[in-house]
Image: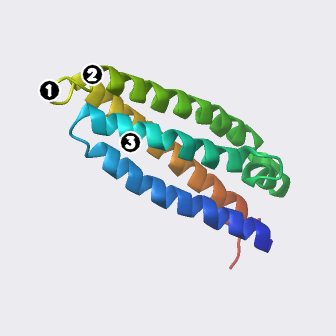
Amino acid sequence: MSESLSNRHSQILDDHRRLGLVLHELENCEQAAEICSQAESLVPWLKRHFAEEEEPAGVFESIERHDPRHSHEIGILVGEHQAMLDQVDALANMARSVKDEPGLNPELSESVRAFILALRLHERKENRLLTDAFYHEEGGGD
């Protein structure tokens, strides 16, 4: 793997580790206002992260060039990016609409849980793709 690709790979994995911390904070929010704030701050971060993966000469293009058998999987992941952005935006809107209610709205709690689960699954798929594309050796060894 070239040094540039290795650096990109490391950056994506580092972003995923930081995302895990943010999702843990979101998961532990006890008020709608906290959820709203966390979701709103997550939007620009996710946009930057997804753009770095999707941009020309970005990580996904590098993976496809290195190992074209991943093209279909990359297409699915790119589609999930927009779904994740839509979901976090909807989560922020929902939290904003109930932020003056006491306690934590059950529907909002379920939406938080669903968003976190979806994003964690997406992240795992990306991590598997990165590992497989850059560290898979054809033919195996002894």
- Residue 9 appears in the picture as rendered: yes
Give the colour scheme shown. Answer: rainbow
The amino acid pointed to by label 1 is: Pro
11 relative to 62 in the view: left or right: left
57 relative to 122 in the view: left or right: right
CA distance separating discs 1 and 3: 18 Å
- The x and y percentages for residue 94 are 36, 22
Residue at 61% across, 58% down? 12
Q: Nearer the viewer, residue 45 or 8?
A: 45
Circle number at residue 38: 3
- The x and y percentages for residue 16 are 52, 56
Residue at 29% across, 39% down? 34
Q: Earlier in the sequence, mark 1 or mark 3?
A: 3
Circle number at residue 102: 1
On-image quarter of the C terminus: bottom right
Circle number at residue 119: none
Q: Nearer the viewer, residue 47 or 65?
A: 47
The residue carrying mark 2 is 98
